[in-house]
Image: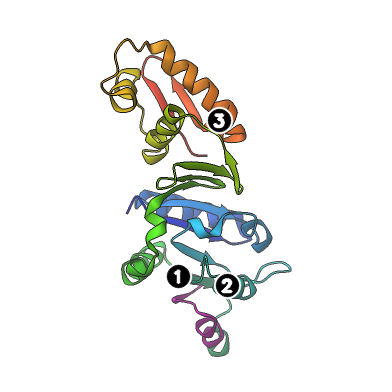
Amino acid sequence: MNNYRILVVDDEEDLCEILKFNLENEGYEVDTAYSAEEALKLNLSAYHLFLLDVMMGEISGFHLARMIKLDAKTAHIPIIFITAKDTENDTIHGFNIGADDYISKPFSIREVLVRVKAVIRRTAHHAPKEQAERLVYKELVLDTIKKKVSISGVEIALTKKEFEILYLLLQNKGRVFSRETILEKVWQEEVYVLDRTIDVNITRLRKKIGAYGKCIVTRLGYGYCFETE
């Protein structure tokens, strides 16, 4: 399940955090947004499932879902509505927009986990192949086919080694790699490569990816890892 990314959109911050905590315990990668407006600032095509509240600010969950389904890049991504708005007409409207499931508040966390698993299992084969060809964290996108990195759609010029270091860390978020392991995986058969070379490349990489540079964390005495917020 670790490769599946879920976006929870709900104006109840406590509920978002509860869902995030429990979904992450199941192995999903989870982001939260407290409004549709906040969600629209994210790279929505990077997700595999949306959990949307209906009753939100100026842009409702229904409206956000409609926008998602009208965009070719996100139309295939399943949507589960989580809401107290549970009349028959509301439910029908949600399914007509393209929802894959509808969970009424109050609900049990166990029910949400079961329904999320069922929807992902049912829809996983519909995801376009390109999803497996990219590594994404928020607006940071690493294209493994074109060997390009971009932030908010703007390409970042990386050297081959910088790209490979970022690929290694981003592909294994949270895992600490020692300098010896990075040397083995990135430099492979090359000789006379010093630990200092890795530090220099990491420093340059951090600068080039701007705000995301803080995600590349040094674990003193152990190595480096890409740590999400």
| First along the sequence among labels 2 and 3 | 2
Residue name at image x 61 percent, y 32 percent: 210
Whole-Å distance between the Cαs marked 1 and 3? 31 Å
Instruction: Name the kind of residue labelled 2 in the image.
Output: Ala
Please state the horizontal and vertical placement of residue 187, each as a whole percent of the image: 33, 23
Tag 1 and tag 2, C-beta contact below 8 Å = no
Residue 112: numbered disc? none
Please state the horizontal and vertical placement of residue 211, each as a whole percent of the image: 61, 34
Instruction: Name the kind of residue labelled 1 in the image.
Output: Pro
> Farthest residue toward the left?
189
Tag 1 secondary structure: loop
Whole-Å distance between the Cαs marked 1 and 2? 10 Å
Task: Please indicate, yes or no, whether residue 4 appears anywhere in the rendered image.
Answer: no
In this view, the residue in front, 44 or 11, is 44
* 179 relative position to 55: left or right: left
- Queried whether the magenta region covers residue 75, the answer comes back as no
Closer to the observer: label 1 or label 3? 3
Instruction: Name the kind of residue labelled 3 in the image.
Output: Gly
Q: Residues within 10 Å of mark 2 (few under 14, many from 20)?
A: many
Res. 70 image quadrant = bottom right
Q: Which residue is mark 3?
A: 213
Question: What range of the chain is rendered magenta?
Answer: 91-105
The answer to whether residue 106 is above or below residue 184 is below
Q: Which residue is mark 2?
A: 65
| First along the sequence among labels 1 and 2 | 2
